Image (tube, rainbow, N blue to C red):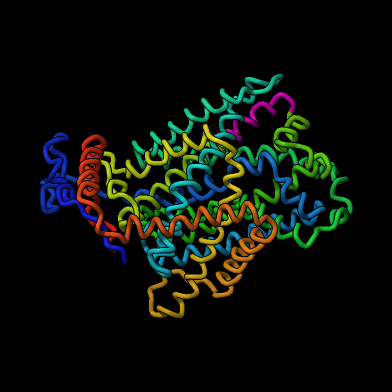
Amino acid sequence: MVRKPVVSTISSGAYLQGSVNGRLPALGGKEPPGQEKVVLKKKITLLRGISIIIGTIIGAGIFISPKGVLQNTGSVGLSLVVWTVCGVLSLFGALSYAELGTSIKKSGGHYTYILEVFGPLPAFVRVWVELLIIRPAATAVISLAFGRYILEPFFIHCEIPELAIKLITAVGITVVMVLNSMSVSWSARIQIFLTFCKLTAILIIIVPGVMQLIKGQTQYFKDAFSGRDASIMGLPLAFYYGMYAYAGWFYLNFVTEEVENPEKTIPLAICISMAIVTVGYVLTNVAYFTTISAEELMLSNAVAVTFSERLLGNFSLAVPIFVALSCFGSMNGGVFAVSRLFYVASREGHLPEILSMIHIRKHTPLPAVIVLHPLTMIMLFSGDLYSLLNFLSFARWLFIGLAVAGLIYLRYKRPDMHRPFKVPLFIPALFSFTCLFMVALSLYSDPFSTGIGFIITLTGIPAYYLFIIWDKKPKWFRRMSDIITRTLQIILEVVPEEDCHKL
């Protein structure tokens, strides 16, 4: 385990004692009478857990452009099969994470499991890429979808200015960051509300689609498996698009330490969420094909809008608003969960110590939340975000596949480990094989983009030895680091957690 750097002047809050209304714990960690410990509280109930999973899985993709699956399968029937199978595979991955989350009761998701099984270097590389590139770019992309669709009703007959989209997007990102900085309870409550908005949006599509089926509108399902044959390369790529649409089932594992009764809540929340999402996704695609032909769907950039314009009349204006709320929910859930990854990585000594500190009154990991803000803004106003995500999308599946493969390794290496929830071994085996197969496929099908992503990921190795292993840093560097940490503590009113993670 990597030694965690300790700044003695701030390790127990002594440096700040009396500087913020005398609310900090005294030196030695003893709490004054009537004071609460400064820890992350267990506020994630079953309903909130379900809302985190559903709220981060269902983003803009199912409403905007499911044509990636159709394009690579070549037929309506096969595309629906792929959507179903991707849901089952995602459930397998989620069940594997349920076992990992109930066996290793620490927050951090992929990072924590890779650290536990494979050691600090792969774990550091994972969090390095996540912090610098993947999470800011992913947040910026989903936020841009939010900005575009929240403005859609105001620009019906003209093109939306790109600057207006980016400004509204910046406001949305800032609101999400502030919300997650201020209160765990409020961010969770809003996530529940936004999850109901997402499910309402899906029902707005599914219900008219079912009515179309009852009326006999099945012409686009005739010869459902006829059409252009899926190529050997196309079918795996269709699974890649499908799996991407289901991504998000792992976010509850990022906040394990804040889940009430995790041994029961995590598996139950995962099973309920994945059942709802899989049924919702398949029925939504069925609804599209009751009104839109495969050829028309391929030409549409916003399938849900095209569908609603044909069936819902004036009410179709509500669909972009629901899509925007869906994107906002994904933003909120993603920031809420991933900030805990940075928090845990800092606690392990892999990120600056300030990121493992908690606000003394709000009990939120304030520094770990706001560190994403400037990085996301840089991504938002920089170049082609979608290309950047293509460069690094393989890294997500590589590390998720490694984490699930680690479950198999732990079964043999630590057979006596307490496992309140245990899955059949074929489930993690099949899922990890699928992830690693997609990674290998991306290396073959798009060596340029994947190669760039691979090189960016490899920069984490020298960074690990420079920032973590090398302990003979100059005195001026250590002094400056201490000053910056103490200054940020005072400004942000944060202190170290009181060892509540020792389970």
500 w.r.t. 378: above or below: below
- Measuring 40% from the left and 78% from the top, which residue is drawn there? 414
Which region is colored magenta? 313-325
- Measuring 85% from the left and 53% from the top, which residue is drawn there? 224
Please give left or right for residue 182 compared with residue 285 in the image: left
92 w.r.t. 415: above or below: above
316 inside magenta stretch: yes
| Near-viewer residue (274 or 493) | 493
- Measuring 78% from the left and 42% from the top, which residue is drawn there? 298
Q: x, y (%) of residue 489?
A: 23, 40
Judge whether residue 307 can be spotted in this image.
Answer: yes
Judge whether residue 265 can be spotted in this image.
Answer: no
- Measuring 65% from the left and 57% from the top, which residue is drawn there? 447
452 inside magenta stretch: no
69 w.r.t. 181: above or below: below
Q: x, y (%) of residue 245?
A: 62, 50
Q: Main secondary structure of the magenta part?
A: helix
Picture quarter with the N terminus: bottom left
Q: x, y (%) of residue 55?
A: 52, 45
| Near-viewer residue (90 or 35) | 90
Q: x, y (%) of residue 139?
A: 51, 41
